[in-house]
Each structure stands twice: as structure tokens, then as C-alpha cells.
Image (tube, helix red, strand yellow):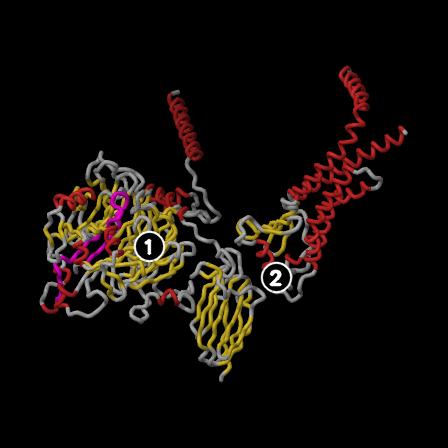
Amino acid sequence: MVTQSMSQTNTLSEHTRSEKIAPRLFKWLPSALMLVAAILLVASIAFPYWGLVLEAPQYPGGLQMRVFVNYMTGDDDPRLDEVREIDGLNHYIGMKSLYEAAAFERSIAIPGVIFMVVSLGVVAFLRRRWLWVLSLTVVVFPFVFLGDLAYWMNNYGQNLDPYAPLSSAIAPFTPPIIGEGVIGQFRTVAYVDTGWYLAVGAAVLVAISLLIRLRISIADSRES
Amino acid sequence: MISQRISSKLLLIGAVFLAAAVLAVIIAPKAITNAQGDPTDWQTIAEQRGLTEADMRAAAMTYTPSGMLDEYVMFASGGHSGQMFVIGMPSMRLLRTIAVFTPEPWQGYGYGAGEEVLAGGDINGRQVRWADTHHPALSETGGDYDGQWVFINDKANGRIAVIDLRDFETKQIVNNPLFLNDHGGTFVTPNTEYIIEGGQYAQPLGTDFAPLSDYESAYRGMITFWKFDREAGRIDKSQSFAMELPPYWQDLCDAGKLVSEGWVFCNSINTELATGGIEAGNPPFEAGVSRNTTDFLHVINLNAAIEVYKAGNTVEVAGMQVIPLSAAIENNLLFFTPEPRSPHGVDIAPGGDFIVVSGKLDPHVTVYSFQKIMDTIAAGGFETDQYGVPILNYERVLEAQVEVGLGPLHTQFGPDGYAYTSLFLDSAVARWSIGAEGYRPQDGWSLISKIPVQYNVGHIATAEGDTVSPDGNLLVSLNKWSVDRFMSTGPLLPQNFQLIDISQEGNNLQLLYDMPFTGGEPHYAQIIKADKLNAWDVYPEVGWNPLTQSVDPNAVLQGDEGVTRDGNNVTVKMTAIRSHFTPEHIDIQAGDHVTWTITNVERARDATHGFSIPYYGISLSIEPGESITFEFDATEPGVFSYYCLEFCSALHLEMMGYLTIQPQ
């Protein structure tokens, strides 16, 4: 009981103190968080957002596909181009070439990230009414990425060439974007990767900044 | 009372026995049995198969479960199969056959592709498509195997082949225009500057005719130094030269290393100048060649010979620059010293300081000191042989003799100062100690141990046993006869490669494993540490030409396939990927000349496609990334189904196409 009351006293006194410091700290914290978010976004370009491992008896170690924000790649040895190998295998079930998937999205990926980073800068330093809406793109970006991925997965899985060699053996399907699936002798494991987590980190920081600013503006409007 | 006591005593004894029996049942080792009641634990299996503890130890040292890779790789000559064989150790599994001098359809060698390499071995315009491969030589850097190239000679026709260890394929065959046989090859200098090829049966240089009655004056021996251009991966004939030698039947050679680098040593077996003629009442070769108690070890100053060659002090014979015997003598390039009769091995110790010779009709290994040879040469004042070659005094160059047994042939080395010599007549391998400083002075020059082998050992090979830093550990006895070692498969029996553990000191040599070898008499083999090899998993880029080791300008990429015609010349551009060739229809006319390129555009390891055209004798192996161009004349009209020879995929049977040739 004693401890509780003491801590309550502490909190109260801190609160009183923080109310004095708050205006300055709260004013700059959202901007700082947005700049950190911008850094996370830029860094995320260098890491895969999403990965897929295909495991089958005749591929010891599995086949790997890593999707970056603007391109796809296989494992570390470029001589054994595993995306190409997956693509080659896909022709048996009549799946379209992976290299044709999300061409538009991949083409605007880097400009899009630049736009978001610039937006964060603008929102961090220029306080205009409604300008903060720009930073919402960062908040929704990782989820838009996954949504788009799910769209293409479904598009590819459902639109199989009926004249493919194994069309009679493999029915159209929707591969999971996270978790395990089975296609023929392949077990697939899909997962979100470092780049995506960095983007989510950026989204969370921006969301926090916006909430802080919201609170400041509510407090300001009360005072005035 | 008494009976009561007795009966209670009996009861007690009975109870003790019962308890003991129960205990015995509980603690007795139990055989684990499978559903059928057959024993399945390894001790029981070993017992039932009659395997001893030593056998189980050998099994533990050699058994290599699925997926475990070998520690060493042996490159064995394939004798008169004309090929080379790659064997993993200690598993003794055959990993690869390398087609060298002889066409081989699995590798698509000589059936549409590889013809250009094979043609390098044509002799005076004639196709010779078999060989008797003898002595593989791995390329060396600083006297140690570097795992980049391997060379091998053809004793039967006097030729040399170059194999690239990035893809384990033969890149070049060179015919020696001076000679129709060789034996003293291949051996490389410590940095693979030169590949040594010594001749064997004397003949007039340049493959000309001379009657046997002119043997002494017209017949000659030779040694050729082929310049290897590592950058190009080819022997450069324009930088190569030979040396004329007396017709003594030079046998085996070895290149000096470390202190003896720049010198070459060869032995010889027919200083008698025997010419045989058993049918005319002459001593047959086997007797005539063995009459003298000594033959001549040849000591050749290679560095000085290179100078003489570069100075142009040569004559041209059949397009080859040859240092005449007179120039060799005059420039102090060649010396002889006696060696025990009919020697068959000349092997340089790891330090390059001792030369070990085995006379196969003398029970000793004879060890010469390189330093003593140098001192004796420097002292001068020699006797000469009938051709004027200076002879070094035997006593002055001799270091030691070790009595090892009957029929000593070839010597290999360990890291611990031990040497190993094969004993043909004893059918055994001897371990003996090199008694010099830096080797095993504690044991002196002495025989340590012998292990019988089954049967009639020729060469032996220890791990990296002829380099400047032998690994030892394992020894393979390359036995000529197997007699009763394997189940009979008819009168033609395999040779027997016997794996022997030499890792323990002293009198402790253990036979581990017998591997039947059906390639042809193996002769020599070399064993390299597996991690020195760095073979490609797939060709580095799609469209690769293994002959140039670069992307072929004619390679076909997906989307560029097609058939084009220019008069009677038809060009087919084709790709192969699981499970189809593109195109699948090739329609041409009888009388067309066809140039056909196929590129395997696969990147997956092991996704090799074969290709065959019936009747026209085409069989290709197109490995992932490889591009092959072949040509043929469409002489016969008809319908020819081409298909993939490798079971590449579930729809492999469907990987085919039709070549239709319309009659004119």
C-alpha cells in the first residue's frame, strides 16, 4: 500500500513536471519519430519483404525466392538462379512467368518509397493543416504490399493454362501468403521478411507520431 | 530332523539356482529382432556374417552413408579403356569416368561433340580412337597438387591429354610426332611449366622406317617437354621440345622438386640394346633386356636444356624441336648412373633430396642422393657409354639400399618419413624408413613392415604421396590380378584396388577394402585431398562452350530458336529445358548439310539433357548451361525421332521431336 501511494505521488509529481517540459518535447518527438521512420523505410529497400521456400525431395535445401520491394531473387549463388528454376517448374502446371507478375508495382516501388520518405520530411517540418494525411501512406504501405502480393498470388494460382502438361493433375489454387501450402510434391513455406518488418516499424512510428500530434492539438485547442 | 534339514538345504540351493537363472535371463545380452524374428543389431549381424573386430574397424573407417562426402579423390588411369576414372576415398566409390582418348556416349564424347578434341590425337592423318592410359599427373603449384588440371599419357600411341578439373572434361589431345609409344609420362614440373613425356620402345625418331638390324645407329629414345600454358589451358606445341636419347627403352621419369627442381630423372631397361627375335633363336626380349646387372638412371638438367632449346641448338624432326644427343652431351644436359637391373620406378622423396629406384629383378630399393649427384657432376672426369654420355660413379652417388622384398616396383611417400614400395613378386607392399635427417633417422634405412596384397601389385598411391607434402593416411594398392577376390563373372577378371590404412606407425598396416576395377589395367593413380577440387556445379553462364570455357557466340537463348536455310545449308537453333526441345519439328531435305546448335538453358544442378538422332549416330550430353554445335550431312531421307537421353523429369519421354528428311 505504502509503495503504491508513493509511486502515485511520484507519478503525480512527474506529471506536473512533464506538463512543463511537455510542450517542447511533445512538439519535436513526432518529427524525430518520422525521421527515424524515413530511415527505416530507406533501409527496407535493401532487405527482402517476403520469402518463399519450396521443398521437394529432389531439391536438397529447397528452392528459395525472395521478394524485395522492387525485384525478386533466389539464393545467394547467382549461377543457380532459383527464381528461374521455380518459373521453369511452374510451366508444368501452367502458371504464368513470375517475371511478369506485379510489373507495374515493381516499377513504381522505388519512386513510391522516395515519395513516402519526402512526405515524412515534409510532414515532420511543415505544420500545415491536413498535410499529415501524406504520412498515412507510410502507415498503410506494408499492408498494401501484402494485399497486392495476395492479389497476385491468387491471380497466378487461379489462372492456370488449361493446356499445361499437368493441368489435369493440379487444379487452380490460392497459395497462402504466410504459412505452409502443398503443390504436387512441393511443400511451400511463405513468410514475411526483414524488409517488411522494417516497413511495419516505420508505419508504427508514424502512427505514434500522428497520435502524439493529435493529442497536442487537442490539448492546444482546450487551452485556447 | 536330518531329512528335514537336508530338504530345506535343497530348497535353499534350488532357490539360489532359480534366482541365478532369473538374473541370467534379465542381464543376458538380448538380440534385437525385427518382425520376422531375424536379428538386426549390428553385433549380431557382424557375428553371423563372420566379420572380425578388424573387419568392423575397417567398415567404420570406410563406410560412407548417403550424403556423406569423401575426404580424398583418386584419379586412376583406365589402362586400355583409354579413359580416366575418378574414385572417392575412403568409400572407394566410382564418382566419374572421364572420357579421354576413346569416344564415350554417356558424356556425348565423340558422337557429334568432342570430335575436335579427339582429332587432336589423330596420327599422320589417321583416326586413332583408343589408348592405353598409364600415368595421370595432377597439376602442381610449388610441388603440391593444386586441383586445376590433370594430364595423362597414352602408352600405345605416344599421346598426351589435358583435362580441365572445373568440368572434368578432356580439352586437348596432343600427338607426339617423334614416337608411337611412351611410358615416362605424364609427370609435371613443380609449377606445371612442363609436362614430361618419356618414350619407351626405341624407334627411329619421327616414326620413320629403319630395319631392326640398324637398331644401334638408327633407333633412338626420347624425352619430350611439353610446355603447358595454364592461362589458355592448353599444351603449347610451339614452346615444347624434346631430347634425343640412346635407344635404352626409357621407362619411368619423375621431375625433381625443391632442392632438385630443374632436374628430371628417368630410368631405362634395355641398355643391352636387345632386339629380340625368339623365332630366329635369339634371346627373347624378356631375357635379352634383363642380361646386364645394371641399367642407366638418366639424370637430365632441364633448366639447362631449356636454355639450349631457346638458343636454337635443336634440329627439327617431324615438326618437333629436338636437342640432338650430341648437343645434350656437349652442354652437360644428360648424365647416367648405374641402377639395379630392369628398374621400374624412379620416385623423388618429398624433400627432392633423394631419388628412389627399384630394380624389379633386385630385392632392394636403391636410393641416390641428389647432393652427391651434383657433387659428382661438379667433380668431372667421367667414363662414358657407347654413345658418349657421361656415367656418374655409382658408389659416389649412392645414398643407401634397403632390402624390401622380391620384385620392387614403385615407391610412394608418407608425411612421417616412411616410404612404401610395391613388391610385385611378393605380392605385397613394403613400408620402409628413410634414414636421413628430416625423415626418420631414428629408424635408419630399414624395412619396417610388409602387408600382403591380392594380387600382383603394380603401382601404389598414397594420399598426395608424390608431392612435397604427402598426406599419407591411406594407400591404394593397384593390383593387376584379383583371382579369387570377387565372384566369377567369366574368364575376364577385374583388377583389384585395395585400400590400406597406413595411418598407424610401425608394423601396423591394415587392409580396409577391395574395389573391383573394370576399366582396364589401371597403372598409376594420384590421390588428392577432396577440398582442393573446385568443380563447377553447373556451367557458369547459359550458352557455355566447354572447349573455350566462355559463352559461345552461337548459343541459343529462349525466344531465338528456329530453323534457317541458305541453299543446302540448314542451321538449327534449339533450346532444351524440362521437358521440351524447341523447336519440335525440323523439316529438311535429303542432301542438306545441317549445323545444329542446342543450348541447355537450365540452371538447376543435375538438369542435364541428352540428345540423340537415330541412324546419324548423334549422342550428346548437354549439361546445365552448356551449348553444343554439331554438324552432319542429311544423306538418308526418312523420319527420325530425336529425344532426351537423360531421364530429366516426369515428362522425360515426351521430351522429343521429329526430324523429317524429305527425299530429293
Q: Position of residue B8 (x, y in %)?
A: 41, 24
Q: Is residue B376 left or right of residue B353?
A: left
- A122 versus B269 height, above or below: above
User: B419 and A14: which one is in front?
Assistant: A14
Residue B490 among those drawn in magenta:
no
Res B483 seen here: no
Residue B275 among those drawn in magenta:
yes
User: B255 and B34: which one is in front?
Assistant: B255
Say what secondary structure mark 1 lies in.
Answer: strand
Name the residue that disc number 2 marks: A91
Q: Quadrant of residue B159?
A: bottom left
Q: Position of residue B227 (x, y in %)?
A: 31, 56
Extent of the magenta region: B248-277
Q: Are marks 1 and 2 on the same chain?
A: no
- B196 versus B571 height, above or below: above
Q: Position of residue B422 (x, y in %)?
A: 23, 49
Q: Is residue B190 left or right of residue A155?
A: left
Q: CA distance from mark 1 to mark 2?
A: 43 Å
Asked whether the residues under the numbered discs 1 and 2 touch, taking CB atoms below 8 Å apart as contact, a structural biologist would say no
Chain hosting mark 2? A
- The label on residue A105 is none
Q: Dot 1: few (<14), some (14–19), or many (≥20) neighbours within 10 Å?
A: many
Tell me the amino acid under the disc marked 1: Ala
Q: Position of residue B270 (x, y in %)?
A: 15, 58
Tell me the amino acid under the disc marked 2: His
What residue occupies the far front of the structure in this picture?
Answer: B311
Q: Quadrant of residue A205?
A: top right
Chain hosting mark 1? B
Res B416 seen here: yes
Q: How many marks?
A: 2
Name the residue that disc number 1 marks: B76
- B617 versus A47 height, above or below: below
